[in-house]
Image (cartoon, rainbow, N blue to C red):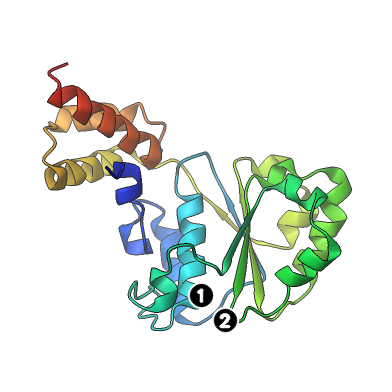
Amino acid sequence: MESLENKYQPLDFNQMIGHEKHKHTLTKMNSEGYFPQSILFVGPPGVGKTSAATIMARSANCQNIVDGAPCLACKNCTEKNFAYIENFIPSDLKTLSISQLEDLCSAPVYYKYRVVIFNNIELLAPTHISGMQKLLENNFRHTRFILLSNHLNKIDPSIISRSHVFEFNPINPHKISKWLLTIAKKEGIKLTESEAFRIADISDGSPRNAIKKLEVHAFSSRNGC
């Protein structure tokens, strides 16, 4: 059985809750075909950074993008494993060979862009900062970088200065509560407004935390707990 977290993973910015200003800016960038060399998404865990990164990658390679949103129907949008996305953590830089780095920056065979996502970029070792700088400052025609971090103040300033920075804040619990009620109605989960707000209020502004708590609530309700 598919988890609620996976089932309601946003596929475009219209499905994301909160971050209205960022969604507007990123959608406009997509509609104009503008994808900066490096984008940095910063904010606490579970507020939408990874979702936004995946949406940007999908939009960049969508064959039929409409009004800045991926069509979700073309081959690139529906590809299960997203071959155009490379996911790394900073420690991976220690093991990447020169040929692997060159491959990252080479033109993908079937897609417009190869999108490289680095999670927890604040953990980048000082010895690898210069290497990351070189990756970000070279104007690669077919490669784009999206950096994710929970702590802006822990990122080397040289990385920040080479990136377009978007700060993601915790989501208002009222917005999360409304979202939970919508999901509960679709899934046939018994959930009152007060229960929804209580879940949202203890989720630290994180939709990811909230939907996990909703799943626990649903299980408890079915079993009479």
Q: Reply above or below: 95 against 105.
A: above
Q: CA distance from mark 2 to mark 1?
A: 7 Å
Residue 126: name its quadrant: top right
Q: Quadrant of the N terminus?
A: top left
Q: Position of residue 63 (x, y in %)?
A: 43, 83
Q: Reply above or below: 156 against 36.
A: above
Q: Are marks 2 and 1 in contact (CB under 8 Å)?
A: yes
Q: Reply above or below: 173 against 74.
A: above
Residue drawn at point x = 19 percent, y = 27 percent = 195
Q: Is residue 29 visible?
A: no
Q: Position of residue 178 (x, y in %)?
A: 22, 43
Question: 127 left or right of 61?
Answer: right
Q: Position of residue 213 (x, y in %)?
A: 31, 30
Residue 13: name its quadrant: bottom left
Residue 2: name its quadrant: top left
Front tag of 2 and 1: 2
> Camera-side residue: 41 or 213?
213
Determine which residue is flagged by label 1.
60
- The amino acid type found where label 2 is placed reads Lys
Mark 2: few/some/many CA within 10 Å (<14, 14-19, 20+): some
Q: How many marks?
A: 2
Determine which residue is flagged by label 2.
112
Asked which secondary structure carries label 1, the reply is helix
Residue drawn at point x = 45 percent, y = 64 percent = 55
Asked which secondary structure carries label 2, the reply is loop
- Going from the N terminus, do you reach mark 2 or mark 1 first? 1
- The amino acid type found where label 1 is placed reads Ala
Q: Which mark is residue 42?
A: none
Q: Quadrant of the C terminus?
A: top left
Q: Position of residue 222 (x, y in %)?
A: 13, 26
